[in-house]
Amino acid sequence: MRVLIVDDEKNLRKSIASYLTLENIEVREAENGLSAQRLLEEEAFDCIVLDLKMPGISGLDFLDWLREKGPSIPAVMISAFGNIDDAVKAMKLGASDYLVKPFDPDELLIRVNRAVAENRMKRQAALAASLPHEETESRIMRDIYHLVDRAAPSDATILITGESGTGKEVLAKRIHEKSLRSEGPFIPINLGGIPENLVESELFGYEKGAFTGAEHRKEGMFEYANGGTLFLDEIGDMPLHLQVKLLRVIQDRKIQRLGGALGLPIDVRLIAATNKDLASMVAEKTFREDLYYRLNVIHIELPALRDRKEDIPLLAGSLLKKLSIRSGKRITGITTDALKLLESYSFPGNIRELENLIERALILCEGDTLTPRDFSLPETARKDLPEKQGTLAELEREAIRTALLRNDGRKMETANELGISRRTLLNKIKEFGL
């Protein structure tokens, strides 16, 4: 927790700061409202302890600024004057609580903790209301989304496992968006894509002169993610000697830059992911057991796409919409036969492979819907499809003719069944003389 103390009385300010620091609370101080505003523009805080009577910007003026232009942070007001009118004004301006000096520091701690907890609950409720519901036909994924809803608001470390391409980073970002850190940064880093000798400097940064070529100080990913979420993808590829350092960071909530002497406090939520079997790596002594249990507080196993085939139509439709906007092509949908083709495929590359197939089909598509001929899949994916005879034009003519018969000649119903627009259907009817 980070608390900002705003009071022009230096002795009282220092006294409160010392007490809260003993309670493992990180504290910053400001001697007036202007200094506090500058700090709030640069740093994130969980609560403000704010004096009512100050020269320049008063506590009430500061509350008014906080409500109109500042971040959404609870404020506990303190004052040497037990004026009921002032207390009422402060509460109307958004103060979470009000204490009269002199007060018991234990009572202040109780009020601060309560204000932070209430603010977190409000933010969580507002965030849940603003996010769209995840669409899925898969019971496995519904259970995963339910777990995400429960786990996201906490700061617990989460380990996401699953095959490559199952959407581990997408899920990690979703957890961040549902968390109380959603206003902070989401920083992903793929440990498997960084040369081993550069992993440490990328994560923790370095000081000027730490090694040959270090001509200036560089912040690492932990510092960039401060106040937010750091996503460590391919955690199974982390070198053993750095696993020790990561474990220490998780335990102490501090990092040390390469070449640096001081530990720097960090406020980061960790989410790790891997397609490897970390439990087996622990048994083989290639991954530290203590780090494994620190990372595995909450475990989410993402299923392969072949184990949630009922979601393929939803995923394909969502990807088609996204990629159509990117490519500028107006593709209205995917035919039923094309979806059956996709559902018959095992997708060893999972959702990432599905996205690649949709993107390729968009490029090759000559009409306004994706059909089986737009997809290039291994022959094994087509083995369950009925064989058809004749040229492509003959097959297309017969499909339209039989669809028209099934729908008693109704053009709109026929077009919907075939997954094409009514205009395209009319053009085809004219072309084939139907």
Image: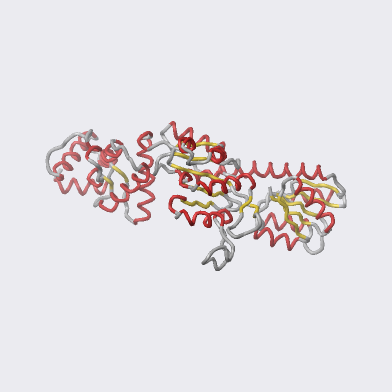
8 in relation to 105, above or below: below
- Residue 365 as seen in the image, left or right of residue 251: left
Which color mode does the image show?
Answer: secondary structure
The image shows residue 396 at horizontal and vertical percentages of 18, 43
- Which residue is rendered at x = 32% and y = 45% of the image? 333
Total number of numbered labels? 0
Question: Which of these two is toward me, 96 or 114?
Answer: 114
Left or right: where 288 falls relative to 50: left
Q: Residue at x 12, y 41 (%)?
A: 390
Q: Nearer the viewer, residue 357 or 125?
A: 357
Percent x, y of residue 69: 66, 58
| Image coordinates for residue 373, horizontal then vertical, percent | 22, 45
Q: Can the viewer see residue 142?
A: yes
Q: Among all residues in the image, which is located at the extreme bottom?
A: 215
- In the orientation shown, which residue stands out farthest toward the top? 139
| Position in image of residue 171 (x %, y %) | 48, 43
Residue drawn at (25%, 50%), measured in percent from left and top? 367
Please name the residue shown 26% across and 49% down the image.
423
> Quadrant of the image for the C terminus?
top left
Can the viewer see residue 413? no
**Displayed quadrant of residue 409:** top left
The quadrant in which residue 10 appears is: bottom right
Q: In terms of image quadrants, where is residue 392?
A: top left
